[in-house]
Image (tube, rainbow, N blue to C red):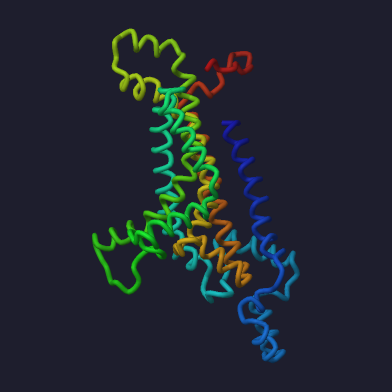
Amino acid sequence: MLKFFKDGINYFIAFVIIISLNFLLPRLMPGDPLTAIYGEEALIQMSPEFKSQLIQRLALDQSLWEQFTSYLLSLVKGNLGYSYYYNAPVSDVIMGALPWTLLLVGTAIIMSTIIGIIIGLESGWRRGKKTDKVLLAGIMFLDGFPDFFLGMVMLIVFGVILGLFPLAGAVTPYAGYSGMVLVLDVLKHLVLPAASLTMVNVTGAYLLTRNAMIAVLGEAYIFTAKAKGLNDAAIRYRHAGRNSILPVITHTGMQVGRLVTGALFIETVFSYPGLGLLIQRGLQTRDYPVLQGVFFVITVFVLIANFSVDILYKKLDPRLEPCTLTTGKKLNPTI
């Protein structure tokens, strides 16, 4: 219980620090919202009275500390603010884009984890053989590409040259699809961005599984399973594989932040209507409330994912929980 409380305190401190940075960093950018939204020519032609009204409406006449205090009070009330550019509540703007990002990131997490585990088990089982060398070289080669670059390659090859998939968006505009036709259309638009994000994030799960598999193959219970005459598939997946995927669970939780960041770039490349496009538009228009709101949502998701993984890992492997003697001293678990 005490350990759970300490973890909660650590996550709360991290949350406060990140929230403060979410507020401060957008305001360190050069320029101001009025110029970004209306343009210099429009500002020149504006009357001083109207310009003053706009400044007051956007709360730009307040000091930085007053804006920060107002921001914190709004968060406590569950209010993410009002968008300068979209002229709508930030929560409504985010809720329109969040499902698409969740769909993209969720698909990439599931696919990269499954693919990484499978090829990691196969590669570790065949350590030093041709299959292992090819898989290791190929995965490391893909890992060298940035998310957005691989996305552009996929877009040019499969979208422009071959014409197999749509070039942009999440659905076909003005098509009026519904039912299963709409689902298939969404999946068709999802293929390229999800594949790009999956390919550049499969490395971690692959390497962890491969290394764990190599270590597990030297354990006594593996030799016992072989002595019993079990086939290779049963040993590889039921015995060695189950103990090789535990590190991948922690890795998956830690990858949420990277996947979300990568998704933001991928969404920009494919004009996918998720949080990435909101950030891009918010940066262009200096829309501080939208930037704060998007960063806040990302922060919450990443912290929840990491906290959930901490709890889940201890449930899956009880050996991580230290034993306590009557003396109150903790024994290091034998792994």
218 or 335: nearer the eye? 218
Q: Is residue 73 above or below residue 140?
A: below
196 or 245: nearer the eye? 196
- Residue at image coords 28%, 72%: 176
Residue at the left extreme, as displayed: 180
Residue 254 image position (x, y, % from top left): 54, 40
Q: Is residue 145 visible?
A: yes
- Residue at image coords 32%, 19%: 232
- Residue at image coords 51%, 74%: 88
Residue 312 image position (x, y, % from top left): 47, 34
Residue 199 image position (x, y, % from top left): 45, 45
Q: Quadrant of the N terminus?
A: top right
Residue 289 image position (x, y, % from top left): 60, 67
312 or 244: nearer the eye? 244
Q: Is residue 153 above or below residue 67?
A: above
Q: Is 234 on the left or on the right of 58, as rendered?
A: left
